[in-house]
């Protein structure tokens, strides 16, 4: 096999591996977002919310779900764009980078929305409820970092 051919094969395989990794990471993030979190379970099952708190939190959750749905659709569209860009050139092109950047922007926006949602829910709670809520948030965030 010639040196040029080996280099080209290495570049193609490296690009393909990077694309599969980016796509797989995106799929992992999107799938994790659809599972009930310990925080959601705590709020609805263990904090003994008043009817007013339930109503207010339900409204916050409806609003957040709508924003989350839009951002998750943007992430899926960015992944589709990435797949198309890789299929067209089979190399790390500006179009590939743009699709990756698009995905990261949507993922970052979703993370910001999620944190704002958590803070908004906390504002509805009593100090005792908020203390339990805070413990769960901290535990959730630090477990994911390990």
Image: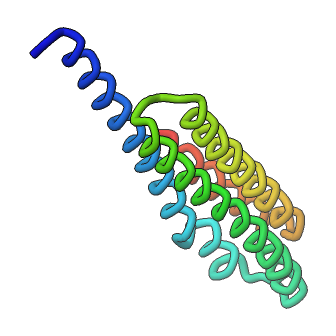
Q: In which quarter of the image is the N terminus?
A: top left
**Residue at image point 53% right, 52% down:** 79
**Residue at image point 46% right, 56% down:** 27
Residue 116 image offset from top left, x and y in percent: 82, 55
Instruction: Say above or below: 21 vs 135.
Output: above
Along the horizontal axis of the image, is 45 left or right of 10? right
Along the horizontal axis of the image, is 109 left or right of 52? left
Name the one closer to the observer, 118 or 65: 65
Residue 3 image offset from top left, x and y in percent: 18, 9
- Check the image and name the residue furthest to the bottom: 51
**Residue at image point 58% right, 39% down:** 100
| Labels in figure, total | 0
Along the horizontal axis of the image, is 73 left or right of 64? left
Give the quadrant of residue 8: top left
Instruction: Say above or below: 85 vs 31.
Output: above
Q: In which quarter of the image is the C terminus?
A: top left
- Check the image and name the residue furthest to the left: 1
Residue 101 image offset from top left, x and y in percent: 64, 37
């Amino acid at each position: 096999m010639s040196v040029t051919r080996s280099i080209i094969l290495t570049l193609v395989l490296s690009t393909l591996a990077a694309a599969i990794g980016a796509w797989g990471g995106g799929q992992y993030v999107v799938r994790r977002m659809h599972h009930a979190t310990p925080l959601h379970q705590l709020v609805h099952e263990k904090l003994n919310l008043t009817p007013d708190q339930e109503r207010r939190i339900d409204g916050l959750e409806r609003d957040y779900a709508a924003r989350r749905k839009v951002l998750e659709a943007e992430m899926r569209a960015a992944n589709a764009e990435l797949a198309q860009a890789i299929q067209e050139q089979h190399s790390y092109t500006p179009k590939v980078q743009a699709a990756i950047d698009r995905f990261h922007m949507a993922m970052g926006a979703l993370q910001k929305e999620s944190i704002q949602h958590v803070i908004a829910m906390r504002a509805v709670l009593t100090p005792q409820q908020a203390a339990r809520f805070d413990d769960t948030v901290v535990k959730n965030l630090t477990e994911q970092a390990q």
